[in-house]
Image (cartoon, rainbow, N blue to C red):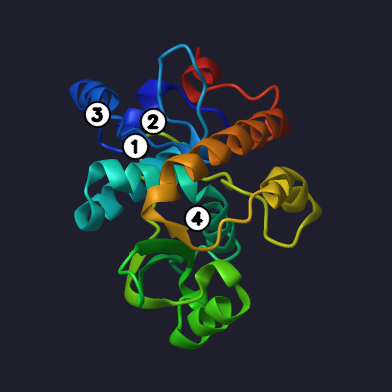
Amino acid sequence: MRITLDELLTVTNTSEEQLKSARRRGQIALAFARNDAFRKLWYLPVDAVAMLLTMALAKVYGASVAAQMVRMFGDAWLTVVAQAETDFSMDALFAVVDFIHEGDGKRAHMACGARDATPEAIAAMVAKSPAAQGYVAERINRMIRVTAARHGIDLTDRFMSAPGSSEFAELMAPYTQQAIGIVELSARRKCEANARRIGELVRVRAMGHRRGSQSLHAAEA
């Protein structure tokens, strides 16, 4: 399913002025690491999820850092969305873990599904990652995936294919080039640039999987 910019703004309760302000401040975050929104482009329902997730993370990290996280950690939260759609009766939790280095005080982040954000899972991840040595978890922020308000716009089709399916594997294949793990604050810009490059490949695949779809407004015309 493809949606228009107007539909995207409606389901996220975002005004044109808020969009313009976010654009000026570099605070737009859509799925697959897209960092801007224009009327001439088509969008996907997961773009709405990205905007809502950015709003939730902004309460903790501020709007600019939240947008950067959503763009940078796309593979993690998109997988959470796909997991949520295997059972619509349950909310799926997305988690960002804040780390601090015991030696020099450097800070870093890691994103994952909430079930991977247990103390045991975090310790196991740190133990097997050379880049994570010396870091300890300082805080875990869990975010509930918010379902877009309906506003008369039908978003009941699945946003993502089921995890473990061949369709999901095919869609997310470019992300195998991106092994993020723990990201130091100083490395966020570089990681985000790589995520944007990979994300555009995935967006093309996602749009291609829905080739021939019409926007809801176009379908009604």
Residue named by callout 4: 77
How far apart in space, not on screen, are marks 1 and 3 (Cα)?
22 Å
Q: Is residue 5 left or right of residue 171?
A: left
Q: Which residue is mark 1?
A: 11
Q: Earlier in the sequence, mark 2 or mark 3?
A: 2
Visible residue check, residue 46: no
Query: Left or right: where does residue 38 sit relative to residue 176?
Result: left
What's the amino acid at mark 3?
A: Arg
CA gap between label 4 and label 3 equals 23 Å
Q: Position of residue 216 (x, y in %)?
A: 50, 24
Residue pointed to by mark 2: 8
Q: Which mark is residue 25?
A: 3
Residue 212: x and y in percent read 69, 22
Q: Is residue 18 left or right of residue 191?
A: left
- Residue at the extreme front of the image, as rendered: 104
> Disc 1 or disc 4, which is closer to the eye?
4
